[in-house]
Amino acid sequence: MRICIVGCGAVGSLFAANLATLADVEVWAFDLHQGHVDAIERDGLTLSGAGTVHAHLRATSDATSLPPCDFGIVATKAMHADSALAATAHAFAEGAVASVMNGVGNEEILARHVSRVIRGTTFPAGKLLEPGHVQWDVKGDTTFSPFEPAPATFEEVEALADACTRGGMPAAAVADARPAQWRKVIFNASTNPIGALTGLSHGRVCERPDLRALVSALVDEGKAVASAQGITLDADPEDLIDHAARPDVAYGHKASMLQDVEARRPTEIDFLNGGIALFGRELGVPTPFHDTITTLIKGVEASWT
C-alpha cells in the first residue's frame, strides 16, 4: 500500500511518521516547506513528546514526482487544500483521498479534484519544532467514513483506518463520520480562537470562568447548527474541552490558531467559526457569537498589513 500525506506539517507529520513504521506501507509526503522536506529526505522524520517515533519516508515539494498512490491523507491548512489537490490529484487517479483537516467543507474541495473521497476527522495535535522534528502534543482518535457525494468504497475506508491503527494512530471506519467531525469542529471553533485572541493555552482559557463561559456559548451555537442538520454528536464537546484542559492532557497546548497568529500566518477561521456561521445562515440558526469571533480574528489578521 502506498500512501501520500499531502501537507506534512504538524498533524501530517504525525500520520507520516507513524505510517512509515509499517513494513507493508510506503509513505510519501508532499509539502512546500523545502527545509522540512530536505530534512526528512536526509535524516528521516522524528516525533517526540506524547510519543517517540523516528521513521524514514520519501518527501518532496515537487508534485510531479509523486507516484500513483492508493490513498492520500490531506493535512494542509484548510485554505490551502484546493491548490494542494490541484497539484497532486494525478497521484490519486486510481486512489482514494481522505481529509483530516480542521473545519467543515473540506471534503467538497477534495471532490473537485478526485473521484473517491473519505470524510475524516482527527484529534491528535502537535507543532513543528524544527525541520524534520515535530513535537507530538496530544494523542487521540481518527474517524473515517465515505463522503456521500463522491464516496470511496467502505472497503477502502476500512483499509486506511486499519493501516493508521496498526501504525499507532488509532482510527475507526464508520458509516457516517459527521458526528465525530462536528464534535471536533465545535471543540476547535469554541476554543482555538479564544486562545488566539488572548495568547493563552487551552488549559489557561478553561480555568478562567469568564472565558470558559464564552467557550460554552460558542459550543451551544455549534450544537444547534449540528442539530439542524440532523447530526447527533458522538460525544459532548464540553466533556472533551474539560478533558483536554487537564495538566496531563493538553493544559499547556497552544492551539493551531494561536500558533498561526503568533507567526502572523492566515488562520482557518473561515472553516471553523465562519463555517459554522455559514451553515447557520443556510439553516436559519442564529450564530452571533461565532459571527463576532470570526470578525475579531479577521481584524487581528488585518492588523498585520
Image (cartoon, rainbow, N blue to C red):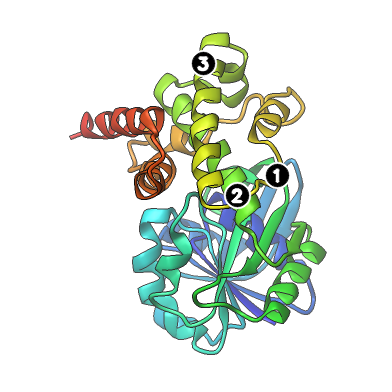
Quadrant of the rendered image containing residue 2: bottom right
The image shows residue 260, relative to residue 149, as above or below, that is above
Residue type of the residue flagged with mark 1: Ser
Which comes before the other along the chain, label 3 or label 2?
2
Q: Residue at x 58, y 37 (%)?
A: 187
Reading the image, the residue beneath label 3 is 211
Note whether 285 is above or below 117 in the view shown: above
In the rendered image, residue 162, in percent from the top left (x then y), is placed at 78, 70
Alpha-carbon span between mark 2 and mark 1: 8 Å
Dot 1 corresponds to which residue?
A: 48
Horizontal and vertical percent position of residue 254: 54, 31
Instruction: Give me the C-alpha separation between circle 3 and circle 1.
Output: 31 Å
Question: How many residues crowd mark 1 within 10 Å: few (<14), some (14–19), many (20+)?
Answer: some
- Residue 62 visible from this viewpoint: no
- How much space separates mark 3 and mark 2, taking CA atoms? 33 Å
Q: Of helix, strand and loop, which one carries label 1?
A: strand
Check disc 2 and give the amino acid type.
His
